[in-house]
Amino acid sequence: MKNIFIVLGIILGIAVFAAGSGLFKNSKSKELTTEKEKENQKIMDNKNVREIYFAGGCFWGTEHFFQQIRGVVGTEVGYANGNTQNPTYEEVVSHTTGFAETVKVKYDPEQVDLKLLIDLYFKTIDPTTLDKQGNDRGNQYRTGIYFSNKEDETVVKNEVSKLAKNYSQPVVVETVALKNFYKAEDYHQDYLDKNPGGYCHIEPGLFEMAKNANPLPKAKYQKQDKKALKEKLTAEQYNVTQENGTERPFQNEYWNETREGIYVDITTGEPLFISTDKFESGCGWPSFSKPITKKLIDEKMDKTAGMVRVEVRSKTGDAHLGHVFTDGPTDKGGLRYCINSASLKFIPKAEMEEKGYGDYLSLLDKK
């Protein structure tokens, strides 16, 4: 069935090439880079991106399906696990090369789990049919999951074995190491993006399902509105965090707190400082050499009160915390985060696990 569309695809591919080459004026959509593409490129540049290969019948639809999933940062269609080199499409469909139409999937393991990708892949295929998916027939349309990383072998085989229990007939999805992979011709790449009405063996509704299959996790810590904070906080806590107030030195809750534990944002509960970074500065307010991570805070120039200082605010809660100075201990980095007790809540070490901060207990191990 797909072969009928190849000639049309070539013609359309030439048209797309012409448009991209400036032969047609209406090329604005080709010139614009989407925010998703920018973010995916950033992830591929900076993170430990993994690769897995899926053969699921016609690779046009399989590629388009995986492109919808959050955490998939790149795809490429090609021919995998055959017995020749650099095959052409015509050679592959001749059934003499042993290649399977396959999609290379690049994904960020911090955003999407391999098990989820396998589970979603199974929704696009009939895993009990050999060399057949949709209207397509031939060994190039066989199903398979090919791993290039030895660590993925156990995950792939275990997950397929688990999913196979849902079927009354034997599952014939190959789960073997990737032997080879050759990129397919350019007109096959992103085919359904270039040809929205093109042939696809996957039900259209599954593409929408894929978009929603891996939603962004709900933020654990969220900023609250001022009305809610006014009801929750004491007058001093509200004044400090929302009105940039300053409490009295030596007359606040944590300036001389020496117990082990974690200090969290009073407005959101988000961890900000750990007791191993706290030191006695003599200023009368809690002093820390650094936050747990700089990602948790914002530092802004403050020219109020006739001084030039650097204000420290919590990033999620946007609460005023205090200021940072350069007169801290040199052996701890030279900084002093001078923080109002009223902007913090202290969780002792003995209560951290119970109150949901167990992941931070390792930070208390003094080195």
Image (tube, grey):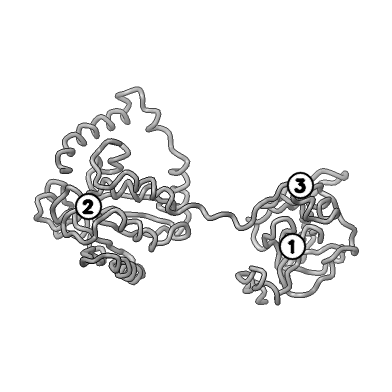
Q: Residue at x 15, y 39 (%)?
A: 4
User: Could you classify mark 1 by the number of other residues whose Cα lies within 10 Å: few (under 14), some (14-19), or many (20 or more)?
Assistant: few
Q: Residue at x 32, y 31 (%)?
A: 20
Residue reaching furthest front? 168
Rendered location of residue 139, percent (x, y):
14, 56
In this rendering, which labeled residue sits more in front, label 2 or label 3? 3
User: Which mark, by number, is residue 214?
Assistant: none
Q: Position of residue 259 (x, y in %)?
A: 77, 75
The earlier-in-sequence mark between 1 and 3 is 3
Instruction: From the top left corner, tell me how far across and down residue 3 is, in percent.
Output: 15, 42
Q: Nearer the viewer, mark 2 or mark 1?
A: 2
**Which image quarter holds the C terminus?**
bottom right
N-terminal of the two: label 2 or label 3?
Answer: 2
Q: Is residue 17 left or right of residue 209?
A: left
Indicate the secondary structure of the residue bearing disc 3: helix
Asked if labels 3 and 2 touch by Cβ distance under 8 angstroms, the answer is no
Of the residues shown, which amino acid type is indicated by label 3? Answer: Lys
Which image quadrant for residue 323?
A: bottom right
Identify the residue at image location x=12%, y=49%: 93
Secondary element under disc 2, as helix, strand or loop, is loop
Image spot of residue 191 (x, y percent) = 28, 41
What amino acid does circle 1 point to?
Answer: Gly
Q: CA distance from mark 2 to mark 1?
A: 60 Å
Decide which of 138, 285 is in the foreground and name it: 138
**Label 2 neighbourhood size at 10 Å, few (<14), some (14-19), many (20+)?**
many
Label 1, secondary structure: give it: loop
**Of the numbered discs in the image, which one, if any, rests on residue 57?**
2
Residue highlighted by disc 3: 227
Q: Residue furthest top?
A: 25
In the picture, the disc for residue 334 is 1
